[in-house]
Amino acid sequence: MTDLTAQLADQVRAATAAATPLRIEGGGTRAWYGRPVDGQPLKLADHKGVIDYDPSELVITARAGTPMAEIETLLAEHHQMLCFEPPSFGAAGTLGGAVATGLSGPRRPFTGALRDYVLGVRVLDGQGEALRFGGTVFKNVAGFDAFRLMAGAQGSLGVLLDVSLRVFPRPRVERSLAFDLSRDAGRDWIIEQMRRPLPLSGAFHDGHRLHVRLSGGEAAVASAAAEFGGEDEALDLWPQVRDLTHPAFQGSPVLWRIALPQTAPLPEFDGRLAWDWAGGVAWLAADEIDPQVWTWAARMDGHATLFRGAKGQVFQPLASPILKLHQRIKAALDPASVFNPGRMYEGL
Amino acid sequence: MMDGPALRAAEDFAHAGYPKSAAAILLCELDGAAHDVEEEIARVTALLTTSGASEVRLARDEDERKRFWAGRKGAFPAVGRIAPDYYCIDGTIPRRSLPKVLTEIGRLAESHGLGVANVFHAGDGNLHPLILYDAGKPGDMEAAEALGGAILELCVEVGGAITGEHGVGREKINQMCSQFSDAEREAFFALKRAFDPKGLLNPGKTIPTLARCAEYGHMHVHAGQVSHPHLERF
Amino acid sequence: MLDQFDARLDADFAALPPERLRAVLSPLLPKGGFVADVESLRAFESDGLAAYRSLPACVVLPETVDEVRAVLAACSELGVPVVARGAGTGLSGGALPFPGSVLLSMAKFNKILEIDPRARIARVQPGVRNLAISEAVAAMGLFYAPDPSSQIACSIGGNVAENAGGVHCLKYGLTVHNILKLEVVTIDGELMTIGSEALDSAGFDLMALMTGSEGLLGIVTEVMVKLTPLPEVARVLLACFDDVEVAAGAVATIMPPGSCPPAWR
């Protein structure tokens, strides 16, 4: 339990005064995600500790440097969990890193994204001023939702100090089933199932088979499983999908994540293709970067990200008016441009 | 959840089937797969009984379910029948503060000389006190406005928010000075300027100026931390 | 009363003569789309917070996105404030006219543009009523989940502006959890697409910023909403208490069950 707000604020003020860029660091497990930042490290890992957790309020508030593993263990002790199923890329991964990168796991299309569960944040702005946006209650429409804006902003808009997250009780029962269905047939099938109120919590195609997870009450899970058939399999598959350690993501120099509308056609580029998020995200393991992927993703009303093998561009290029708006938003909160400059895009 | 005054007004208006002698009622909807809902009904019934409910009743059919909700949805207009005017407040609090906050609201209402009926989204802490007043009576409207402001500041003080779903708009512009610091409000203005540099879109709403907060002059209550916590303020 | 705006405490703009506004804006609008006579303006003097009243300089009722863009660009050029209005059911005076402002009514944008039950989405104009979406898709076994008490009358554009919730939001989420994409016109008349039909987008989460921004950042001209499968059954329990404080204490013990995860997608 250490509160380093004062020291961190001093460092930010000094950086702003000298216009020195800062590279915000947590546990370092997600440093590969995004463009490299040339700046002085601003270390958050020691600014840690759970500030408040009341299971009956369904809220946990912790400092940004708190290891995610510690938070998830604490929640599990009270039969609660983070519904967005954040990926883990190493034991040192922190709450701040998870929120700043905004990544959500296989549960995302069924129970929502990380940003949906952020209730409030405390951040340092470019002046080194600690600002609180949002709070610890679910229904709160006072002021702009600057707290949700921080989720996935990769530290470009401020230094996350504390975060309040909404938590939920764990499902009473979970089961995983595998099906011999092709990528396209499996996707069509899950799209049809999602029109019904079924206890689905995961749908992943590894390139060979479809895997479906069910979560909920005993009766609903049992009746869905009986109807679906398929082959029972171990639930350990899902952490591998979440953390990208499953073989479908491995063994290639380049890994694309292509988010696309669930009913858009799947991409047809060279490489091995898997999909997660019930067909809303395609994962393409390729030997080299084909820039056509960006164009194709944009045409599908989606976007592509290079999870491995990026050279320069990592994230989908933004339309010019949108990029300008991003620059104005960054300038609003970080006028001296000291927070992770260039992390998301050149010139941002 | 509705307290006595709210549920009696709603019952007279909508004939929802609420017990008029109760001090409060709680409506709890469970939806999903049929089997799961059956299990949950048993679980929640037991929980409510243990927590002190004098009676727990399950809506027999879809008609009765709709009637129960019609009473809740009609609670606002219903209250319009027990007072010439009512003013609906919209704050959010952590659920654990509810007993304390209800007591304080009662005390604040008494000191402002007005009645209050309470409607509450129990699941998420969203509070809707309905302040009863008479716009024809000199000073009543202003007293209602002042009481509403005091209730919202109470919400901030227990760690909640000045609006759960109605928005700040013009109504709660002064209470934004309680919820946010000068620097936080300035950050909102900076974000607004990124979209609307001349400040032409919906001016005078949602984010108060520094001048307004200075004039409004209220202490800044921040996430339950007040500057002089030992002082009696209710 | 707060319906009196204060130039010193709120905002100050040079007043424009009404004939100037008419001369500039009227040609940009369809017939009857520019209103400035006091009797007609009265219909727009307040929203659901009826105790607060104030008159705008004029009301404009565009029918196309291009008209919205032209009106906003002209207002920006003139330096005249703009207050957007949906169905006018809001309870915080968000659509209360600022004195001398142009009140931009989105009432004519009342069409459901597309329903795709397979993708579980609908594309709607901002003036469409909240309940009208659920009614239009009920036969497909779907609904639009956020259900504010005013859902029979309130518009989806207003719901986005206020990030409206509803009785069932504990399970189904707020407006921000149930929309995918917005078409937004900025004060300079620029049309921007925010969000996408995919579940996330590159860059900052501008959807989060726009939702609940109460008409301060831009004018929403189209909304893509997510549709949710109707639950198999819904049952209601009514619990009675002899003591308010006991009831208040009981509330904190009720939790979403482990069989019922949040269902926003």
Image (cartoon, coloured by chain):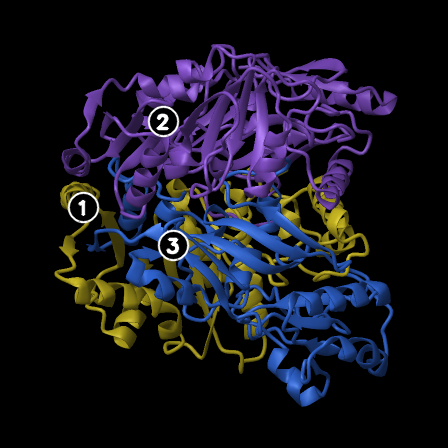
Q: Nearer the viewer, mark 1 or mark 3?
A: 3
Chain in purple in the render: A
In the image, residue B177 sits, relative to residue A94, either above or below, namely: below
- Residue C184 position, x and y percent, is 64, 56
The kind of residue tagged 3 is: Ala
Q: For the residue labelled by badge 3, is the local secondary structure a helix, a strand or a loop?
A: loop
Q: Nearer the viewer, mark 2 or mark 3?
A: 2
Q: Which chain is yellow?
A: B
Quick check: marks 2 and 1 in contact, CB under 8 Å?
A: no
- Name the residue at 40% across, 65% down: C131
Q: Secondary structure at mark 1?
A: helix
Element assignment for label 2: strand
User: Could you give the CA–CA distance between mark 2 and mark 3, rounded to whole angstroms?
Assistant: 29 Å
The kind of residue tagged 2 is His
Question: What chain does badge 1 belong to?
Answer: B
Report the residue marked by disc 1.
B37
Does the image show residue B228? no
* Chain painted in blue in the figure: C
Q: Amino acid at mark 1?
A: Val
Q: CA distance from mark 1 to mark 3?
A: 19 Å
Residue topped by disc 3: C145
Quadrant of the image containing the C terminus of chain C: top left
The numbered mark at residue A205 is 2
Label 1 Cα neighbours within 10 Å, binned few <14 / some 14-19 / many ≥20: many
For residue A55, above or below residue A195: above
Quarter of the figure with residue C125: bottom right
